[in-house]
């Protein structure tokens, strides 16, 4: 009897140790990443880094204002593509999706989610960049938007599924047509969760580099309008990090810090949004 | 095996003598996928009476109730045949809009299901869906129905508070007010008090008594004392069949079928 208990206690301690180690490792990676980025990047993170254009090689100073604005514009286009398609697709799957068609849509979304980002980039390159003849913000945003679709779609679907059927029935029993029940009751009940999911899908593509290499390319100057090549934070980091200049390396670190702060900020905002929600937090 | 003819029972004249028939059900059969949930049920439900549906779990009483406002339409694989008429209008006709039907036949569910909105917006939901936009008119409807549901005094100061802040019993009365706000003719109640404590249950039962003056009420209940207390007529279902239907008093004191007596006296179920 006591031997059994002793063995169980040993196993218990072992398993607890293993899970604790995994937790510490996960947290440790994040803390290390943040700390190292802050340590390396903070020295170059000046006001002019955020407001000035890149300086020519050999000239000190300069910044990445064009990359920050470029990333924002790319994400704006990505949101215009990814959010409507992802959101409406998620509504379809959760509220109307039954049978083979819905299963295929769901499966396609999962496959799309697994498509390597560079493949998305090269596809948009072939379908948009080559016919048009030049790289552009629109092409880059489209590539990012395509990557957002499966994430936004599944997030929307999951949060709508959390809405109890009793609410749908309540609305229908009051004589509301199906679409009215969905628009006025189901979606509002899940709205915080859906907003969170959409925000996270945006944060997820904010750091993508590969799809931009073939589509938005890069630019050392301001990119006017939407149809010119544009700088973006991830591509700038890539370009500056592999350049042979020590000063550029420092700026890449600073850009990394800016990008991570933006993504982390989005994640925290999403979490705060969810905490106040009626569904998803309960 | 029960005699199929027994499913064609009607209440004795005394219980319905002053009450015209509101709902007529003939040969109603419901399948869920391959399983037969309701087997050739026919009965007449009188206007301005409370009709209770009793029977053990899975006997088809909730299925029957959900046929009366076509809520089964939304269950995949559910198939309904037979005839149901309200005031003589068939409700399963090809040209019948279930949305319009549900305006005439309201429903209160077992578990209170207020929308995560304010108390006011909950009650005003139905009228708004049906096109009422005038704030003053909506305010009148909300006050009238909350009074009918005996909730007005408890919530009049906080109509803008979330409905989810109310207690379970208050939420259920809110759901009743919300159902009444679309001015239905029939109110279906699916075990409306089963999740409530005795005091809240007593309030709901009192409410049912009040409401039958203005509405025709059909209530499913697991609680036989409740059926005896609130209803004028009782229908006993077992294994998807209607076993016995008659005035509540007679059914409980002098059941016509041995199966009914077994259930009522607690020998099974």
Image (cartoon, coloured by chain):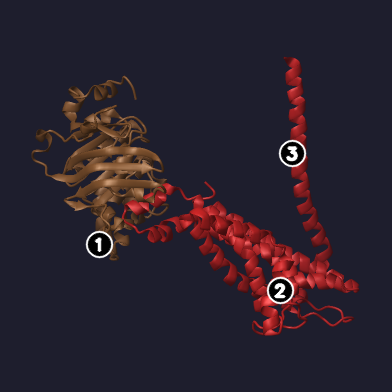
Disc 3 crowd, CA 10 A, few/some/many (<14, 14-19, 20+): few
Q: Are marks 1 and 2 in contact (CB under 8 Å)?
A: no
Task: Give the residue at x 28% y 57%.
Answer: B94
Question: Which numbered marker is on residue A68?
Answer: 2
Residue position marked by numbered label 3 in the rendering: A19
> To which residue does mark 1 refer?
B137
Relative depth, front residue between B134 and A74: A74
Left or right: residue A256 versus residue B243 is right
A259 displayed left or right of A92: right
Question: Is residue A273 something one can see in this rendering?
Answer: no
Question: Could one spot residue A257 in this view of the protein?
Answer: yes
Q: Secondary structure at mark 2?
A: helix
Spot occupied by residue B21 in the image (x, y as percentages of width and height): 14, 44
Residue A75 numbered tag = none
Q: Which chain is red?
A: A
Rendered residue at 31%/51% (across/down) = B178
Q: Position of residue A99 (x, y in %)?
A: 49, 53
């Amino acid at each position: 009897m006591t031997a059994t208990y002793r063995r169980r206690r040993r196993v218990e301690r072992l398993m607890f140790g293993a899970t604790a180690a995994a937790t510490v490792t996960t947290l440790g990676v994040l803390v290390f990443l943040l700390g190292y980025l802050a340590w390396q990047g903070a020295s170059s993170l000046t006001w002019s880094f955020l407001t000035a254009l890149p300086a020519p090689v050999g000239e000190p100073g300069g910044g990445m204002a064009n990359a920050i604005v470029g990333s924002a514009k790319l994400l704006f286009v990505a949101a215009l593509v990814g959010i409507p398609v992802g959101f409406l697709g998620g509504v379809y799957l959760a509220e109307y999706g039954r049978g083979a068609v819905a299963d295929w849509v769901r499966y396609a979304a999962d496959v799309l989610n697994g498509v390597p980002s560079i493949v998305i980039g090269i596809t948009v390159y072939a379908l948009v960049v080559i016919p048009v003849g030049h790289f552009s913000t629109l092409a880059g945003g489209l590539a990012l938007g395509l990557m957002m679709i499966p994430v936004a779609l599944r997030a929307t679907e999951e949060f709508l599924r959390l809405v109890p059927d009793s609410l749908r029935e309540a609305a229908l029993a009051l004589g509301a047509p199906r679409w009215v029940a969905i628009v006025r009751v189901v979606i509002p009940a899940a709205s915080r969760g859906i907003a969170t999911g959409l925000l996270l899908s945006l944060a997820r593509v904010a750091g993508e580099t590969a799809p931009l290499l073939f589509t938005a390319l890069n630019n050392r100057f301001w990119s006017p309008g939407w149809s010119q090549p544009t700088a973006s934070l991830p591509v700038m980091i890539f370009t500056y990090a592999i350049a042979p200049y020590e000063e550029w390396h420092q700026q890449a670190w600073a850009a990394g810090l800016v990008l991570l702060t933006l993504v982390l900020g989005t994640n925290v905002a999403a979490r705060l949004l969810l905490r106040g929600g009626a569904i998803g937090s309960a | 095996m029960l005699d199929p003819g027994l499913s064609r029972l009607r209440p004795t004249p005394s219980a319905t003598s002053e009450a015209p028939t509101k709902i007529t059900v003939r040969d109603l059969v419901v399948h869920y996928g391959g399983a037969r949930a309701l087997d050739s049920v026919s009965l007449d439900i009188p206007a301005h009476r409370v009709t209770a549906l009793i029977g053990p779990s899975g006997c088809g009483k909730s299925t029957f109730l959900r046929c009366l406002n076509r809520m089964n339409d939304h269950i995949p694989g559910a198939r309904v045949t037979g005839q149901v008429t309200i005031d003589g209008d068939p409700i399963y006709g090809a040209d019948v809009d279930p949305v319009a039907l549900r305006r005439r036949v309201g429903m209160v569910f077992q578990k209170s299901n207020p929308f995560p909105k304010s108390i006011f917006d909950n009650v005003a939901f139905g009228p708004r869906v049906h096109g009422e936009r005038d704030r003053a008119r909506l305010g009148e409807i909300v006050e009238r129905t909350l009074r009918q549901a005996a909730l007005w005094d408890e919530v009049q100061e906080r109509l803008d508070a979330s409905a989810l802040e109310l207690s379970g019993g208050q939420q259920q009365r809110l759901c009743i007010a919300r159902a009444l706000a679309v001015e239905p003719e029939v109110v279906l109640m699916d075990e409306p008090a089963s999740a409530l404590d005795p005091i809240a249950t007593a309030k709901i039962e009192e409410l049912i008594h009040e409401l039958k003056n203005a509405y025709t009420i059909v209530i499913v209940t697991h609680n036989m004392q409740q059926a005896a207390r609130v209803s004028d007529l009782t229908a006993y279902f077992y294994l998807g069949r209607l076993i016995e239907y008659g005035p509540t008093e007679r059914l409980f004191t002098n059941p016509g079928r041995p199966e009914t007596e077994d259930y009522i006296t607690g020998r099974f179920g």
